[in-house]
Image (cartoon, rainbow, N blue to C red):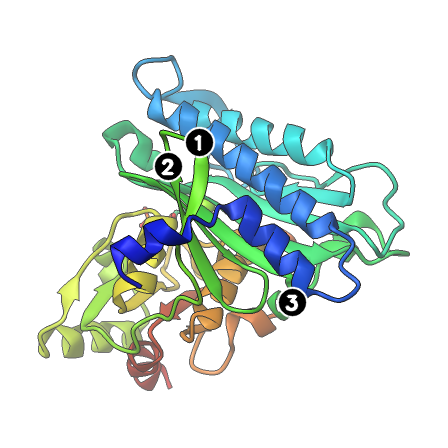
Amino acid sequence: MSVSDRHKETITLQSHILGSEARQENATGTLSWILSALSISAKMIAASVRRARLDDVLGEVGNENVQGEAQQKLDVIANDILLRILAAREGVAIVASEENEEPVIIGEEDDDQKYCILFDPLDGSSNLDVCGGVGTIFSIMRNRSGLSAKDSLLQPGFEQVAAGYILYGSSTIFTLTVGDGVDMFVLDPAIGAFMRVETNLKIPQSNKSYSLNEGNRLSFPEGYKNYLHWAQSNGYSARYAGAMVADVHRILLKGGVFMYPPTVKAPVGKLRLMYEANPMAMLVEQAGGKAMCDSQMPIQKVQPTDIHQRVPVIMGSTAEVDKVLKFLQ
Ligand code: AHM
Ligand code: MG
């Protein structure tokens, strides 16, 4: 699609969501209502991120989150915005955040018509101090009545009905899948609306580029070390923003492979299955890519046993993921 065609199209995220709803038989509008809450939250978080150093929003709060990591002020601001806005929406049964130990039950839990929303409110927040890209990641699943909140949430990634991220970078990007491809929107600050810039986005099938924290190389399993040796002997470039949203966003547009391997310090990797790996895996697969934990296990097939569990992550262009997997067998 050319730039002029994009401008002619002028589809906002709101009209895109309403259009998808109209194409679904038996749609009740509940999911659209939740997606619109996420869009408002994204604009509010973007406004706070943009005021870093102007307002007192940078630095640590002095608490640790459930993962034992220092919480940044903006982590807490973003978490509060999402919890407050989602809690006020009809159709939300349970909200679970990377920042909170326990899921929050909203209203009547025992209802199959409702949805559970899991999110990482501000992924990569250590980038904030240096004006680097950060993001929000979300995953939406159906509520399962008759189960406790935690048990209702413990569904494998292939059960997600929608997933997406918001990247707060040099522009604010909203990338969304509701299970029929991937669409991308950019916030137009002049009118305060997310405008569609890509529809049915496809990830390039290959690109000689890998993205991982190479500082951990000495503690990677042998297979990853061998892959890196091979990639460096074959003209690959390294690109690592240190924020999964920024790294996977680049890979969706340009191709390549993103990894967070097991390390001695983090023996099952660092990234969280439910808040980071699953939603990003759904987006990557919906864009025609591949997302694995190891040579055998697709991320979206992992049966979760804990809402905060971590998994190794290898995702991106199918051909590039397969090259890594060959070294892990
Ligand atoms: P966070 O959710 O606490 O911000 O941590 C997740 C982030 C990812 O965005 C990123 O890929 C990874 O941690 C970077 O970790 P490292 O600094 O170990 O490379
Ligand atoms: Mg995160």
Residue 178 pos. (x, y %): 59, 61
Q: Is mark 1 within 8 Å of ligand 2?
A: no
Q: Which mark is residue 188?
A: 2
Q: Are marks 1 and 3 in contact (CB under 8 Å)?
A: no
| 166, 209: nearer the viewer | 166
Q: Which residue is mark 3?
A: 156
Question: Disc 2 and disc 3: Cα gap in Å?
Answer: 35 Å
Q: Amino acid at mark 3?
A: Pro
Q: Earlier in the sequence, mark 1 or mark 3?
A: 3
Badge 1, how many Cα within 10 Å: few under 14, some, many 20+? few
Q: Can residue 75 be seen from the camera position used here?
A: no
- What residue is drawn where x is 84% and y is 36%? 107
Q: Which mark is residue 5?
A: none
**Circle 2 SS class:** strand
Residue 177 pos. (x, y %): 53, 60
Question: Disc 1 and disc 3: Cα gap in Å?
Answer: 35 Å
What quarter of the picture does the C terminus occupy?
bottom left
Badge 3, how many Cα within 10 Å: few under 14, some, many 20+? some
Query: Toward which corner of the image does residue 278 lie, by quadrant?
Result: bottom right
Q: Which residue is mark 1?
A: 192
Reply above or below: 86 against 322.
above
What quarter of the picture does the N terminus occupy?
bottom left
Q: Are marks 2 and 1 in contact (CB under 8 Å)?
A: yes
- What residue is drawn where x is 44% and y is 76%? 294
Reply above or below: 75 against 271.
above
Residue 202 pos. (x, y %): 37, 71
Question: Disc 2 and disc 1: Cα gap in Å?
Answer: 6 Å
**Circle 1 SS class:** loop
Q: Amino acid at mark 2?
A: Asp
- What residue is drawn where x is 37% and y is 13%? 55
